[in-house]
């Protein structure tokens, strides 16, 4: 159905319509757009990973200071 001859004819017609210089410009612009898109995707992934901060080990997230926890526990026991 679609053979290599068809592809060559289409490429020759495109070359004649746009010209070699214009095709180079279109190709370089397309390449720059793809690189920019990939860079943006990578930056977005890095930002998302930075926002997911792992919890601190050994410290309580609610009471980072051990004395604050003891104060709250004493107050709760007295009630």
Image (spheres, grey):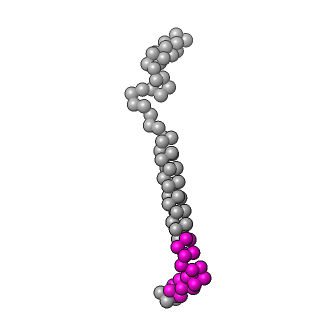
Q: Give the residue drawn at x 57%, y 80%.
A: 19
Q: Would residue 77 be counted in the magenta stretch? A: no
Q: Position of residue 32 (x, y in %)?
A: 52, 63
The residue under the point 54% across, 79% down is 20
Q: Residue furthest top?
A: 78
| Main SS of residues in magenta | helix
Tell me how many marks there are: 0
The residue sitting at the right extreme is 17
Q: Position of residue 61 (x, y in %)?
A: 47, 28
Q: Nearer the viewer, residue 4 or 58?
A: 4
Give me the residue at 57% from left, 84% from top: 16
Q: Which residues are magenta?
A: 6-26
Q: Is residue 78 above or below residue 38?
A: above
Q: Is residue 36 above or below residue 26?
A: above
Give the camera-side residue of 68 and 48: 48
Looking at this view, is 23 or 33 the one in front? 23
Is there any visible trace of residue 5 in the rendered image? yes
The reply to whether residue 77 is in sight is no
Residue 33 location (% of width, % of height): 54, 62
Q: Is residue 23 magenta?
A: yes
Q: x, y (%) of residue 70? A: 46, 15
Q: Which residue appears at 47% of the width and 38% of the height? A: 53
Residue at the outermost front position: 21
Rendered-image quadrant of the C terminus = top right
76 versus 50 height, above or below = above
In this orientation, which residue lies closer to the viewer: 60 or 6? 6
């Amino acid at each position: 159905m679609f053979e290599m001859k068809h592809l060559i004819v289409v490429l020759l017609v495109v070359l004649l319509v746009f010209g070699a210089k214009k095709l180079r410009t279109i190709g370089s612009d397309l390449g720059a757009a793809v690189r920019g898109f990939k860079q943006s995707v990578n930056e977005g992934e890095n930002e998302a990973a930075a926002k997911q901060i792992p919890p601190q080990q050994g410290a309580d997230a609610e009471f980072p200071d051990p004395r604050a926890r003891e104060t709250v526990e004493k107050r709760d026991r007295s009630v």
